Amino acid sequence: MVGLQGAGKTTWVAGHLAGTHEVVSKDRWPRARRREARQQRVVAELLSAGRSVVVDNTNPSPAEREPLVAAARAAGVPVRAVWVDTPPSVAADRNAARTGTARVPEVGLAATRARFAPPTAAEGFDRVDVVRHAPDRGAPASPRGPVR
């Protein structure tokens, strides 16, 4: 998954992949040390066990996505990016409506926006799907197909 905080990634995963994939998210380990290393270990273990995996994080830059692509390649499985393309203002409004630890501080939103680059097949993805924000429903729609 790729997208800003509040883009709708978790909602999309719940509606499209949660029944068929193991969901890995650093948000599930808020107090863990070395969350990135833990994520890589969990993803590699699940892939080596033959499980389908979805990583539900922002994954905003090619550098942050590269270890995930490498893990899939090492396991010999196809790797797909799903970019939830929601306007930053909509994502920020959704984040502002969150409460407690689910709400990301503005500095975190700004840091993610500054690093953000849309995923491309040149990064090693077999497929890149773009899910556009559906303004009438307020949630991401189905993928619009591969983008290369």
Image (tube, rainbow, N blue to C red):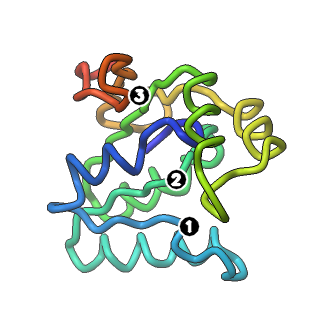
Q: Earlier in the sequence, mark 3 or mark 2?
A: 2
Q: Is residue 40 above or below residue 128?
A: below
Q: Quadrant of the C terminus?
A: top left
Q: Position of residue 61 (x, y in %)?
A: 63, 38
User: Badges 1 and 2: C-beta atoms under 8 Å apart?
Assistant: yes
Find disc 3 in the rendering and name its residue.
121
Find disc 1 in the rendering and name its residue.
26
Foreground mark, 3 or 2, reads 2
Q: Residue at x 49, y 25 (%)?
A: 86
**Label of residue 70 in the image:** none
Q: Residue at x 50, y 35 (%)?
A: 7
Q: Secondary structure under badge 1?
A: helix
> Image check: 103 left or right of 139?
right
Alpha-carbon distance for marks 3 and 2?
Answer: 19 Å
Q: Secondary structure under badge 2?
A: loop
Foreground mark, 1 or 3, reads 1
Q: Residue at x 22, y 71 (%)?
A: 51
Q: Which amino acid type is marked by label 3?
A: Ala
Picture quarter containing residue 106? top right
